[in-house]
Image: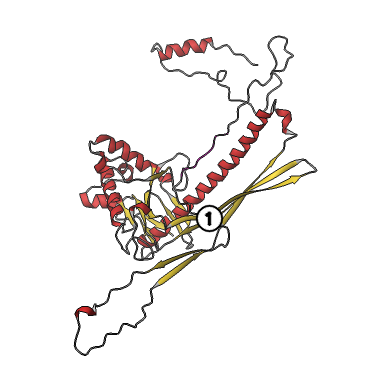
Amino acid sequence: MEINQIYELLNLTVEEITGKSDLVQEDLSNVVDVGNEIISTDNVDNYVKKLVNHIGKVIFDDRVYKGNVPSVLMDSWEFGSILQKITADLPQAQENDSWNLEHGETYNQDIFYQPEVSAKFYNSKVTFEIPVSFTERQVKESFSNKEQLNGFMTMIFNSVENAMTLKLDSLVMRAINNMTAETMLDELIGDDDEIDTTETGNKAINLLKLYNDQYGESLTVAEAYTNADFIRYASYIINLYKDRLTKVSTLFNVGGKERFTAESDLSIVLLSDFASASNTFLASDVFNKDLVSLPNYETVPYWQGSGLNYGFDDVSKIHVKTSSNEEVEVSGIIGVMFDKRAVGVANLDKRVTTNYNAKAEFYTNFYKLDAGYFNDLNENFIVLFIADTDDDTGDTDTTTI
């Protein structure tokens, strides 16, 4: 074992923490052990310099990753592959003849009124597998007892489960991102085949434009999500749309269908940057928090990825090629509100198959996952975003598809 004398460093740290010295560069190279992949040949005792140091304790980094994505998982089924979703349109009202009776008239009641019913069929899946090989006889040489061996194997199993969870989470977010892109395409597309993010609509809502227009402000994106007045206004709009969605309307889905979303069926997913800003700059500074608080919601740290530094432009951005084969790149998305029937992960099937190699004495597990990810453009889905309005030159920020 390597032993280092650090009394000089300790004396220096005491001076720093007691106010006797400015902060100086500290050499921690001989203090913090970052570990080695393979122990070197100098790991011998400090007495006769011949005895090899033994491993005194073994720990396994087997933390379980629980994931952090919105709840859109549906049930699974064993037989068949197609998901059929049937909906009925609202029937039209007709004149009630009970109050228009006339002598000698005949009132025909034998007319057949066929209900208008439509069906959508979803019959696609994505799939992947993670193969991992295991040995028992060979790896026993590296451990002192069966408890250590079991701990090692558990660590490997957990690493696979963590990988499966991470990949499943990323696919769930892609299902939401595709729906987001399709909604913005339908709402904000212009005559020049560009998405104009300086505009706003019924289901793709530029909260910053609404705020600036209503109050005559010129708030920018960089200022918006730390501005208490804007956050208060955004919370007001989100709560307003939560109530609006409970009423039957054709305004909040791409298909223009007559739909409503009960509060119990509504999912609200907010970007952590915005949700945290609301808690910090708004809710913590008022007495009646219930009046300005956001409705029940889930959070995500990013829609697609963190980028290199978790910058707002990165975490609020999606850059996708949609199911309709259009490319969409837009940032500033701070939340989505949708009916639980709009986005789903259906018929999830996780399983493990095993193959044993008798010649080399190892076995391989193939961890497999199948699932169908769907968007229903006829269901309510709202995108909440912030984007700067027209600048001094009159140009607009656009996103090309």
Residue shown at 47% from the left, 45% from the top: 305
Q: Main secondary structure of the magenta part?
A: loop
Q: Find disc 1 in the rendering and name its residue.
A: 76
Q: Position of residue 67 (x, y in %)?
A: 49, 42
> Label 1 sits on what residue type?
Ser
Residue 363 quadrant: top right
The question of residue 27 being in magenta is answered with no
- Of 250 and 8, nearer the camera is 250
- How packed mark 1 is, by other alpha carbons closer than 10 Å (few <14, some 14-19, many 20 or more), is few
Region of the chain picked out in magenta, as a range: 62-68
Residue 212 placed where, x, y %? 25, 50
Viewport quadrant of the N terminus: top right
Q: Is residue 211 above or below residue 253?
A: above
Q: Residue at x 43, y 42 (%)?
A: 301
Q: State the image coordinates of residue 336 (x, y, percent, origin top left).
A: 38, 51
Residue 389 visible to the viewer:
no
